[in-house]
Each structure stands twice: as C-alpha cells, then as structure tokens.
Image (tube, grey):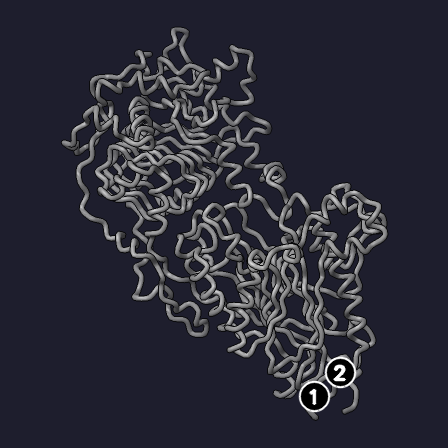
Amino acid sequence: MYSPSPPAVTAGANPYVYLNHHQTMPSGQFASRAQPSAVSAMGVAPSPAGNSTAPAYGHSPAMASLGATRFGSGASVGWMSRQPQQPQTQQASHFVPHYGTPPMSSLPHSMNHHNVLANIAPSSPSYTNLGSPHTAAFVRSSVSPVAPTQPTSTSNSSSNIANASPEWLQQMMCAEISRQSFAPHHHARAAALAARSSANHGQDPKKGIVLPAGVVANGLSFPIKGSDSTVQSADTSLSMSPTKSSSMRTQEADPKDSDKSWSIMDMGGLKLKNIGVDIFRYTFLTSLFINHNNLTTLSPAILQLRNLSVLDASANQLVAIPPEIGMLTSLSALFLFDNQLTILPPEIGTLYQLEMLGIEGNPLQPNLYEIIKQEGTQALVAYLRDSCPVPVPPPEREWISLDMDLPSMSAEEDEAYTFAVLSYNILCEKYATAQMYGYTPSWALAWDYRKECILQELVSYNAEFFCLQEVEMGQFYDYFEPKLNQHGYEGIYWPKSRARTMRDDERQHVDGCATFFKTDTFELVDKHLIEFNQIALQRPDFKKTQDIFNRVMTKDNVACIGMLEHRKAGYKIIVANAHMHWNPEFRDVKLVQAAMLMEQLEMLGNQFAKRPSQVKCNENFRPPNYASGQQIPTLVCGDFNSTPDSGVYEFLNKGFAPGNHEDFMDHVYGTYTSEGLKHNYALRSAYSNIGEMPFTNLTPGFQGNIDYIWYTSNTLAASCLLGEVDSTYLSRVVGFPNAHFPSDHVCILGEFKVKHLGNEATS
C-alpha cells in the first residue's frame, strides 16, 4: 500500500518529470523493482509486502434516504415544500436484476488485437514492447491478463461485432487496450519511453509529452472523442470568472499548483488491496491510474481530486463506485473495465464532460448496457442524471442580525422605516440550455419547473422590493407580473436594447431587468430606463474614441430606476436594478457601465429631490425635505458580474477609480480614462458588514460573489441579512441550478432602516 507524503515542489519543473526519471536498461528492459520507478521518483515509496496498515475502505452509501416529498418541510420558506415533477423514466431507478454480459477477454478472429490497435495507435511516439516488464512483443495473448470473475455465456460472434454501434466498437477497443496494460507502472513506463523518444527527435523533454488530438496521455491510445481543446471550448463559459478570462485564471492560478513537478500518478499493476487516503491530498492530479490491482472499493475521499480528467480503475475487484465520483466534473475518461460492478451510481450523471465511460467486462444490469451499447457514453450519463434521486434539501438560510447605532423609535415608526430588498438573477429560459448546464437534470432545468420554484421563493421572503435580472419579456407580462400582482406587488420592466429592433414574437424572449414593489407600502412616482450604449453616444468625449464603438456600443445591457414614496411615512426612496455585461474579456466595459449608471443616478436623484411629495403621509409622520439626491435613501442592486477584487467593486465602494486602472486594459474612454471615475454617493455593500458572500454564482467552473445590494450608508442602515447556503449541503453539490436552487445564482436579501435626516418638515 502507498501512503505518500505531499510531493516536493520545484519551481518551473516539468509536469511529466517523474516519468522521465524512470531508469531503463540499455537492452530496452525496464529496471528492476529495486530501481527507482515512476512512482518512487514522485516521492512515493512502496510499503514492504504484508506491512500495509491502512484500513480498507467500505464504499460510501448513497445519500440519505428521502421522505415522501422532495423538499423537507420548512418553517418559513414554503417554496421548499414543493413536490417533484420528474419524468416517468425516473421510476427506472429501481434496478432490475443484472444479466450476464459478454466478456471482452477474447475477440473474434475477424477483429483481433492487431486490427484494433492499427486504427488508434498514435503516430508518435511508438509504444511497442511495453506489454510486459520483460520487453515481450506487444501482441494479443490467448488469455487476457484480467478477465471478469463471472464470465458470461453470451456469444461473441462476428455478426455481433459487425452489427455493433460505433460507440460500442470504441468501448471494446478501449477495453482490449486496457487489458494489455497489466504490467506494473505500465502507463508511466510508456510515457517515459515517449519522453525519451521525443528528446531523441529534437523535442524539448521539459515541455512534456505531446500526444495526438483525442489521445489520453496514459501511454496507450484510447480513442476518446474530440480533443482537449474541444473539452475546454465546450466549458469556456463555465470556467471563466466574470472578471478574469480563462487565460488569466490559468496564469493566476495557485502558484503552489503551478510549480508541481508532476500531475500524473501511475499505481497500476501492483496488486494493491488498499490505497492510502493521503493519495487524495494530491488535488493537483489530472490523471490517476490504479488499474490492475485488487481493490474492492474506492474511498469517498476521491472527491478531493477535482482536477482529474482521466481515472483508470480497470481490472480490479470493485463491487461499487462511491457516489462522490459525481463531484469530479473535469473527468473526460473514466475506465472501469473488468470489475464486479452490477450498478452505477446515478451521481455519474453530473459528469457532463465525460466522453468515455469504460464499463465492458462488468455484470451490469441490462438497461444500462443497452443504452451505452446503442447510444454511447453521453446517453448513459444523461440517463443517470435524469434518474438520480433528489438529495435531501438544505437547511433554511439563516437570518443574520446586525448591530445598529440608531435612535430608538416607536413600534409604528420602526415598521414604517424598515423594509427589505431582494436581488436575484433568475437565469432566463433562453440561457438555461443542456449544453451550458449539462450537470443539471433535464426536469430541474425545465423552465416550467424553475419558474414555480422562483415564484414561491420570492413570495416566501415577502420583501418590499424584488430586483430581478434575466427576466424575459414574455415571462414578465405572462407570468411574473400577474402572479405577483396577486400578492400585492406591482412591477416595472425593460428588456435589453436589442428588443426594439425585433419582431414581436422574437421580442418576447429578450431578457431584461424587472423591479417589483409592494403597492400597499410604496407608491411609484417615476421610473427611468438606462441604456448604456445609448448614453455612451450622448457623451461628446466618447465620440472620438474607437473603443466606444468597438466595445461599449455592442453591449446592450440596461438598468432600470424606480422612484417611490412611502405611503405612510412620506420619505422618498430610489431603487436601481442593473445587469452588467458578463464577459471577463470586457471588464473595461463593466467599469464604463458602472460609471454611467452612477452619473445617471446622481442626475435623476437631484431631480427627484426637488419634486414635491405626491403622497399624503400619516399625521404621525413628518416627510423629510431633500437638498440633493444624495440625501434620498438609495439602493443599487443587481448582477454586476464583478468580484470584490474588481474595478467595478472598487469604484462603487470607494467612489473613485483612477483613469489608469488595470481593468481599463489601456483602452481609451474620454475623461473616464484621462481623469478617472468618480461618484458622490456614500455607497456600501450590504454584505460587507459581515464579509461578502463566498459566492452568489455557483457552477463547476466558477464560484464567486458577483451580485450585490449597495445602499447609501448616510441614509440607510443594514439591520438583517440572509445568510449563506449550508456548507454541508454544498459539499455534495456540483453546481446550480439543481432541484433546490432554480438558478445558477442564489438570491441575496437585506433588511434596512431609514435614518432620520433631522430636517423633517412640519405636517
């Protein structure tokens, strides 16, 4: 058993260097076990035979059994008591008895080993003479090195091969290749030989091994669909931070990880019965080979290896796979050939990037076999995803009370001067595609399910203001407005600028910003639309810069501003609801949009301050007079697509950003870049009182805080905040949306109290 300590770190080291350290004899034979092996070169020494003291791992049980309903009963959040709306196919989660499956230990003569390898061997380097430590020719033996424990009697006729689908032929090819990889450290040896071959051909060994597209870097050519670039491009939108591009995130990754001298571990062919838990501390691993051992279980601790793209556990004695495997969303290849698996955990359904699931040689239940034989890996992943039982819902998010230094008020005053605001990007139907959210069950991604969850969540929080982003025009008028009207809300809405040039049917699917308010508490006095690209055209200093036309004008984001008065107390309030551009490559545009938002807010606020009150307040209250817009309680809510270390956050928080700010990226925007950005509001993020949320947006590729409720600290005080999502629940969640969270964002909610200005007018 291996129980290694953390690896040594060498700056600038080759990630494959541990493979190149393997010694090979001049004859081409590999060094004996006493010689440094690929694993020992990694700082991992094998324990003496019979001295393994690590406990055996029992397989992790499935998640806690569910009650009769999908959501647990909640004390105050009624939306979590909804019944599931799952398709009929979910009844298939009760596995039927398995039947025998044909072993792949022997193929018919019409498809022998040489024919299999001929079509899939990489062009360079050569992998010959790697089938055994004794340099035996790499040919098909009459008996497979590892065969299923319970062989089946199903015929392997040539006609079956001829009628097999391309997906199943690929499965058989990979299985046969896997069976030839039984030698100790086979993959490490193959990679070491490839590295030496590259060096002999004038290639730089320090650059690692460059394999052909679609070939897994494991020493043999597994015919995986697509290439690494395909996988990366498919997940680009999920892997990019809103404030940093994918390339920047790679460059600015944890330096400790970037300095690792290796990222692939080969423990194959060692007949191990257990694997030390310390192995799973190597979170930087991208490939792990534990094939051809005697493992009966995999530790649930494997969920720590979130960077794995290849996991080979073939030719063991596994009887179950832990559900934690579903957390390894970077996996593109999962090889489980020749084990004792009768079922697969439905959590495999979250592996949305999986291109090859190797299950041949297992006595799996027939319905799973039929799916992968006819339609391939991705069809089976989709089936498991939609059949996965709904996990136990999280505990309700706690209310966090804040200390306030405010004068005492009567109960009537406290009620009148207190209100709550919720901000929520609800993920419109158009953007919620299976390609973008491949880890979400189709029924949980369906808009009919999600919109009801969203509505019940809003109603349960009972806030005075709802600031929603990504609301489609058709959904606002046909669903949210009439539904919320029944609960005493009125709304204002504007779609993105593109809607004005579209046909009526197309316009219904354009998303925008919607703000709802309680009509029995506030009266709407005025409302305004802010179209950032149109405002940019009105600035004379912008007309001389090409960046305005090339970068700002092409983004049609909007914000809406509502100006209201409290019906009972008479005070005014301004609520801004914004949705900034998303692309991290345009963080300069986000800064420009934030600056224009604050300029418009200041101008409209000053106008609103001069307007006489339109409500007749209660005789016990004195409506204040306002000298300027800065004295009016103001809220700026929305999805700013900017993390707390961004220029947008710095500008809103400090009231200033220099013209040479790094987020401008040397682009020119008139006085914004020549003089800097400035606003006169004393803005503060509501959650900065307790530390910003760990995230408001959660996907497999990004977890961060990009939604905010900003308030004017001179006129308002935050009294309560809605807390975080339970961490224990999150430890088993790949990303949102899911059954319990209908958007990839979570809502944020704050309660505020109006401060007295001391200049109230007499009634």
Amino acid type of the residue that numbered disc 2 sits on in the rendered structure? Ser
Kind of residue indicated by mark 1: Cys
Give left or right: position of 132 versus 155. right
Q: In 3D space, how far apart are the residues under numbered discs 2 and 1 (Cα atoms)?
A: 9 Å
Is residue 531 or residue 583 the one in the foreground?
A: 531
Query: Is residue 251 shown left or right of residue 725?
Result: right
Q: Position of residue 24 (x, y in %)?
A: 41, 13
Residue sticking out furthest to the top: 27
Query: What is the crowding at mark 1: few (fewer than 14 residues within 10 Å), some, or many (at least 20)?
Result: some
Q: Which mark is residue 249?
A: none
Which quadrant holds the C terminus?
Answer: bottom right
Residue 252 lies left or right of residue 743; in this view the side is right
Numbered disc total: 2
| Residue nearest the viewer, comparing 231 with 401 | 231
SS category of the residue bearing label 2: loop
- 327 to 340, vertically: above or below: below
**Can residue 272 be seen from the camera position used here?**
no
Badge number at residue 613? 2
Looking at the picture, tell me which residue is in the foreground, 9 or 354.
354
The residue lying at 64 percent from left, 71 percent from top is 718
Residue 617, label in figure: 1
